[in-house]
Image (cartoon, helix red, strand yellow):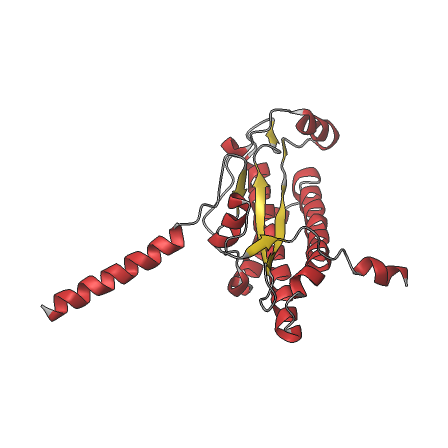
């Protein structure tokens, strides 16, 4: 009897853990948020307009125009004495992405860029968490979120431009394979800062996940702009 009770307890605990891991929605009718097993498919390109696709096809010969990046938000407590919180999640916008032809390499590149958006989201998350550990201030994220996320967004856009040029425009030999290996290595190295399902769900829900918090309507702008002017 004791062994049966112990087994039931273990099964209940495992079930609770698994349910907790899968209880957060990470996709809706408009957006797909990054998770390890999530892949973009041709059916996800749902823009009602082909104008961007036509423009880039005529200029570069591309068959897709995709909207990939990462979103971020800072939530602040309703009362003093608690720390602010931030959420970052890579996103593929279905309604913002169009498809002219089912080009397998274009799809591979978009999934590569989606993964790179996750790498950059992890980089921003790592910087913010380390800064908070150092400062221990209740408004660290409200102060520095914009500066750090903008910095990583710039790196991401630079990566996008390079990959699209080398793989899809210039069609360099082994360019895709090389970049795929690089991004996979970066994902492996930064696993401890991966985007969690609850990070994605924060944007699906479009409101704070925790009680007594509200979205920060105003946070400090890019502090790097001031330093550049000096």
Quadrant assignment for the N terminus: bottom left
In the foreground, 175 or 138: 138
Residue 105 picture location, percent across and down: 57, 38
Residue 59 picture location, percent across and down: 75, 30
Q: Identify the image quadrant of residue 230.
A: bottom right
Query: Is 42 situated above or below 81?
Result: above
In the foreground, 125 or 12: 12
Q: Is residue 51 visible?
A: yes
Question: Residue at 23% of width from left, 60% of height from top?
Answer: 11
Query: Is 92 situated above or below 213?
Result: above
Question: Residue at 59% of width from left, 66% of height from top?
Answer: 83
Q: Is residue 179 visible?
A: no
Instruction: State left or right for residue 138 relative to residue 40.
Output: right
Q: How many marks?
A: 0
Residue 100 picture location, percent across and down: 60, 26
Instruction: State left or right for residue 158 relative to residue 99.
Output: right
Residue 76 picture location, percent across and down: 61, 58
Instruction: State left or right for residue 18 relative to residue 136.
Output: left
Question: Residue at 66% of width from left, 65% of height from top?
Answer: 139
In the foreground, 227 or 157: 227
Question: Residue at 18% of width from left, 68% of height from top?
Answer: 6
In the foreground, 129 or 213: 213
Query: Is 100 situated above or below 164?
Result: above
Q: Residue furthest front?
A: 79
């Amino acid at each position: 009897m004791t062994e049966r009770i112990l087994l039931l307890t273990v099964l209940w605990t495992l079930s609770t853990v698994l349910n907790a891991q899968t209880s957060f929605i990470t996709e809706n009718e408009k957006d797909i948020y990054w998770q390890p097993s999530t892949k973009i498919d041709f059916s996800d390109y749902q823009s009602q307009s082909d104008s961007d696709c036509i423009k880039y096809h005529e200029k570069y010969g591309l068959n897709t125009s995709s909207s990939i990046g990462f979103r971020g938000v800072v939530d602040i407590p309703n009362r003093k004495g608690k720390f602010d919180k931030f959420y970052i999640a890579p996103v593929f916008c279905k309604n913002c992405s169009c498809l002219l032809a089912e080009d397998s390499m274009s799809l591979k590149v978009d999934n590569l860029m989606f993964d790179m958006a996750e790498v950059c989201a992890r980089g921003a998350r790592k910087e913010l968490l380390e800064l908070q550990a150092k400062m221990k201030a209740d408004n660290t994220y409200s102060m520095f979120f914009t500066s750090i996320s903008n910095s990583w967004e710039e790196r991401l856009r630079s990566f996008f431009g390079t990959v699209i040029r080398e793989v899809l425009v210039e069609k360099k030999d082994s360019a895709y394979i090389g970049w795929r290996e690089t991004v996979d290595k970066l994902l492996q190295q930064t696993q401890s800062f991966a985007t969690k399902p609850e990070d994605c769900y924060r944007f699906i829900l479009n409101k704070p996940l925790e009680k007594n918090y509200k979205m920060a309507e105003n946070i400090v702008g890019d502090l790097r702009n001031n330093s550049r002017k000096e």
